[in-house]
Amino acid sequence: MSEPSERYKTGMKTRRAVLGAHYVDAAVAATDEFNADFQTLITESAWGSVWSRETISKRERSMLTIALLAALGHHDEVSMHVRATKNTGASIDDIKEALLHVAIYAGVPAANHAFKIARTALAELDAESKA
């Protein structure tokens, strides 16, 4: 295996900062020959390029990501990124605002389901912080 690119290294640093080491370590541990190229792609492209840009804050990027994922019905990813708000600085009010935008611009059913997912993810975070 070749040395990781600088973009990969940057992406992994950003990915860990946003999603948390535990989540990223599990994803890395689950990497195999079949999905290794995909893991490299998302680490370099999503995390090493887009998420590592400084044009907007991690908080703003988090809100955009939650709204887009909710609008597209990517429910597992909505939960993951709601949980990541503990690292991005996006507040509960920020999540609500993003999902209200989803209701208007992508439809009430998408927002309704995303609110349920977000509520569950936030309750899990709260329980973890008290444990």
Image (cartoon, grey):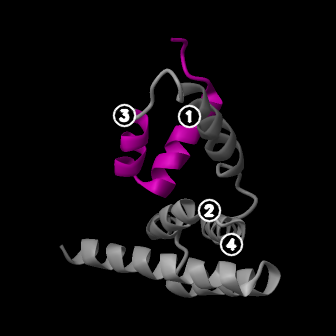
- Residue 51 placement, left or right of 79: right
Q: Could you tell me which secondary element the residue under label 4 belongs to?
A: helix
Identified by mark 4, the residue type is Ala
Category of crowding for the residue at label 1, using alpha-carbon neighbours closer than 10 angstroms: few (below 14), some (14–19), many (at least 20)? some
* Image mark for residue 39: 1
Identified by mark 1, the residue type is Gln
Q: Earlier in the sequence, mark 4 or mark 2?
A: 4
* Image mark for residue 74: 2
Residue plotted at (56% across, 34% down): 39
Residue range in magenta is 1-28
Category of crowding for the residue at label 4, using alpha-carbon neighbours closer than 10 angstroms: few (below 14), some (14–19), many (at least 20)? many
Is residue 101 covered in magenta? no
Residue 111: % across, % down = 65, 82
- Residue situated in front as seen by the camera: 56 or 120: 120
Q: Earlier in the sequence, mark 3 or mark 4?
A: 3
Identified by mark 3, the residue type is Ala
Residue plotted at (72% across, 80% down): 102
Report which residue position mark 4 lands on: 67
Q: Earlier in the sequence, mark 1 or mark 2?
A: 1
Category of crowding for the residue at label 3, using alpha-carbon neighbours closer than 10 angstroms: few (below 14), some (14–19), many (at least 20)? few
Residue projecting furthest to the right: 105
Residue 30: % across, % down = 40, 35
- Residue situated in front as seen by the camera: 48 or 1: 1
Q: Earlier in the sequence, mark 1 or mark 4?
A: 1
Identified by mark 2, the residue type is His
Image-quadrant location for residue 9: top right
Q: Could you tell me which secondary element the residue under label 1 belongs to?
A: helix
Report which residue position mark 3 lands on: 29
Residue 48: % across, % down = 64, 41
